[in-house]
Image (tube, rainbow, N blue to C red):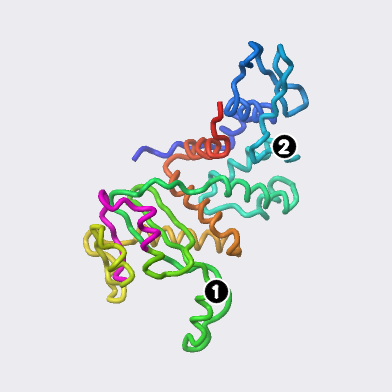
Amino acid sequence: MNKVKKYSIRDLKRDFPTDEACAAFIFDALHSRKCSCGGTYSPLKGRRQFQCSKCRYQIAPTAGTIFHKSDTPLSLWFYTLFLFSNAKSGISAKELERQLGVTYKTAWRILNLIRKALPQNTEFLTGDVEIDETHFGGKGDAGKDNKKLKAVMRNKSIIAGAVERGGRVRAKIVPNLEAKTIGKFIDNNVNPITTRLFTDKSRRYESVARGYDRFSVNHSQKEFAVGDIYINTMEAFWSHLKRSIKGTHKVVSKKYLQSYVDGFVWHYNNRHSDSERFSALLGALLPASK
């Protein structure tokens, strides 16, 4: 694997030193400098707009983007994107509030808009794919001898996950752990032809994974790896997700949990290069429309 190419605050200041530089980048990502009338677009001083030199038509480059109608300077937006891109364990709205000098409401809105712009793709996972599920969040204590365990577990969210070894990960909140539900998740995310499927010994897989080349380990028998048969990659992702949310965000409501999961999935899938990850984030927020 190639050495990770870093992207530091010095690089950010070199590439996007001013609000004008940020606006120009957004404009060039979404529009052409050449107008249909034959003129050329150039920035209007003191405004987030570009005007044609001939027909005088004006374009606001941030219109239709997450930057639209935001009073926050674009340079602070790009600094936030830099922080988000490099924060593999996440960044909280409270921390962003302190760093930007904005209100908590503004910081939370910025991060929420970024996460909402990072939905997981729908391409099938292939090769060696591990499948697992986890419970997350909720309130309450199971009490003595786990008498209240069922009630506590009902308050938790269930997340199903699949990961290619050395490749991409996919994670979605599911309503339950029924075989039908997990089977639908597998069918929507895993190629049955070009895949070796690795699971635990749960009975729910016996029917839904029949069309797959499946291998499993028996965790109830303290069996965690037999040669290359294991689901440790997926479990490592769960561990990072839970520790990061608990340490950085403290609490995440069920309403927004999927967007946080999407953010961690995006980081994992773009983990190999800091500079490429920052470029990928800009690309996700500014889809080409020329």
Assess disc 1: are there few (<14), some (14-19) or many (≥20) residues with their C-alpha within 10 Å of its C-alpha. some
Query: Where in the figure is residue 104, as x and y percent of width and height?
Result: 72, 53
Front-lying residue, 136 or 83: 136
Please state, as top left, top right, bottom left or bottom right, where the N terminus lies in the image: top left
Q: Is residue 270 left or right of residue 204?
A: right
Query: Where in the figure is residue 26, as x and y percent of width and height?
Result: 62, 30
Q: Amino acid at mark 2?
A: Pro
Please state, as top left, top right, bottom left or bottom right, where the C terminus lies in the image: top right
Front: mark 1 or 2: 1
Give the labeled residue for mark 2. Answer: 73
Q: Is residue 220 magenta?
A: no
Front-lying residue, 14 or 203: 203
Q: Which residues are magenta?
A: 183-202
Give the alpha-carbon distance from disc 1 to disc 2, as whole Å.
40 Å
Give the labeled residue for mark 1. Answer: 155
The kind of secondary structure element at disc 1 is loop
Front-lying residue, 99 or 129: 129
Assess disc 2: are there few (<14), some (14-19) or many (≥20) residues with their C-alpha within 10 Å of its C-alpha. few
Mark 1 and mark 2 lie on one chain; the one further toward the N terminus is: 2
Q: Residue at x 69, y 50 (%)?
A: 107
Q: Residue at x 37, y 68 (%)?
A: 179
Tell whether label 2 touches label 1 (CB within 8 Å).
Answer: no
Q: Amino acid at mark 1?
A: Asn
The correct choice, above or below, for 215 with respect to 117 in the image is below
The correct choice, above or below, for 260 with respect to 70 in the image is below
